[in-house]
């Protein structure tokens, strides 16, 4: 089922002067919908609230939440992509005072990732494209995803389900569309995202719920490539697929480990009724 709503009404496009189109001036959330319910929705709303506050986009979050819930009920199963832009503007970078933000909801079928990605793991492609450092935008899921577009264009081999992205200093940050965790001697490690990267909803759920539920110590800090290669386990995560173990990167090989399996089980329980 394919659905589209703009500002709560059926539509197939937005005005050409919308600042989301002209400047990438906005944010988005990609929300899994199951049995008519938006999953991990409170976390999506929290991230969106943080993002519109950082970008100073006025947004009625209560109205938006209602629109998403109604949209999810109509969609039933699949993916709801929520886009919030600063709205229509005149030529030039300066935001228009009093401009109304544009709310876009796009519905699509679930991506249908192969089940063996979660069971057996995935190959991780070492992307040459680097993430630029901009602390003012770090963590936000803003509309400018050109770095990810360029990184994803680097490979066509189906042996790779995701790509590894590093920053300009060579630090390990995330995947093209996922966040990354390492398991080192029973500790969970994930990258500090204060310079660049996207603070994913599933990443937050693992940090705040799944890891504490298992009593796993967790560190958020800079990670280098050698530390990644030395890790006991590596896995990727996002809100659509949950957790994928990583089985290979360059010449390094891993097997899905015990910690990864425990986290997968905790997430299956904790998100089933969200």
Image (cartoon, rainbow, N blue to C red):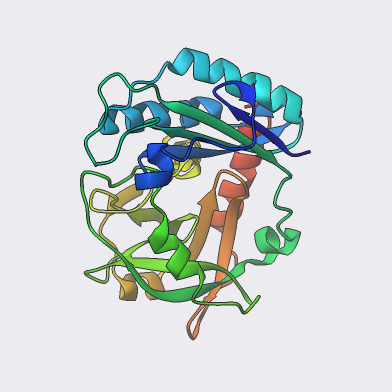
Tell me if I can see residue 132 in this picture: yes
Residue 10: image quadrant is top right
Q: Residue at x 41, y 38 (%)?
A: 17
In this rendering, would 95 be left or right of 127? left
Quadrant of residue 90 in the image?
top left
Q: Is residue 168 left or right of residue 185?
A: left
For the C terminus, the image quarter is top right
* Coordinates of residue 206 in the picture (x, y in percent): 47, 42
Q: Position of residue 260 (x, y in %)?
A: 55, 55
Describe residue 237's horizontal placement relative to residue 135 as left or right.
Answer: right
Q: Quadrant of residue 91?
A: top left
In this rendering, is residue 242 above or below 176?
above
Name above or below for residue 120 compared with residue 13.
below
What percent of the width, then of the height, locates residue 145? 42, 55
- Where in the figure is residue 160, as x and y percent of width and height? 59, 73
| Count of marks placed on residues | 0
| Foreground pick, 210 / 34 | 34
Can residue 183 be seen in the rendering of this structure? no
Q: Residue at x 67, y 63 (%)?
A: 117
Q: Is residue 137 above or below residue 208?
A: below
Q: On the rendered image, what quadrant is the N terminus found in?
A: top right
């Amino acid at each position: 089922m394919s659905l589209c709503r703009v500002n709560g009404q059926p539509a197939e496009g937005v005005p050409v002067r919308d600042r989301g189109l002209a400047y990438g001036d906005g944010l988005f959330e990609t929300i899994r919908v199951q049995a008519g319910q938006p999953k991990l929705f409170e976390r999506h709303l929290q991230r969106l609230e943080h993002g519109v506050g950082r970008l100073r986009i006025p947004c009625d979050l209560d109205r938006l939440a209602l629109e998403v819930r109604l949209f999810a009920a109509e969609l039933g199963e699949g993916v709801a992509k929520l886009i919030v832009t600063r709205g229509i503007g005149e030529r030039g970078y300066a935001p228009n005072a009093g401009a109304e933000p544009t709310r876009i909801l796009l519905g699509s079928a679930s991506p249908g990732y192969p089940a063996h990605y979660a069971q057996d793991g995935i190959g991780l492609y070492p992307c040459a494209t680097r993430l630029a450092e901009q602390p003012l935008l770090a963590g936000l899921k803003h509309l400018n995803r050109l770095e990810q577009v360029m990184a994803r264009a680097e490979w066509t081999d189906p042996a790779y389900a995701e790509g590894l992205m590093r920053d300009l200093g060579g630090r390990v940050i995330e995947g093209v569309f996922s966040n990354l965790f390492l398991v080192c001697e029973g500790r969970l490690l994930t990258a500090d995202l204060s310079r660049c990267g996207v603070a994913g909803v599933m990443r937050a759920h693992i940090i705040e719920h799944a890891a504490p539920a298992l009593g796993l110590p967790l560190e958020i800090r800079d990670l280098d490539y050698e530390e990644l290669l030395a890790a006991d386990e590596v896995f990727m995560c996002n809100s659509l697929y949950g957790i994928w173990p990583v089985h290979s990167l360059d010449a390094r090989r891993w097997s899905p480990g015990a910690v990864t399996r425990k986290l997968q089980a905790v997430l299956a329980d904790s998100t089933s009724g969200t």
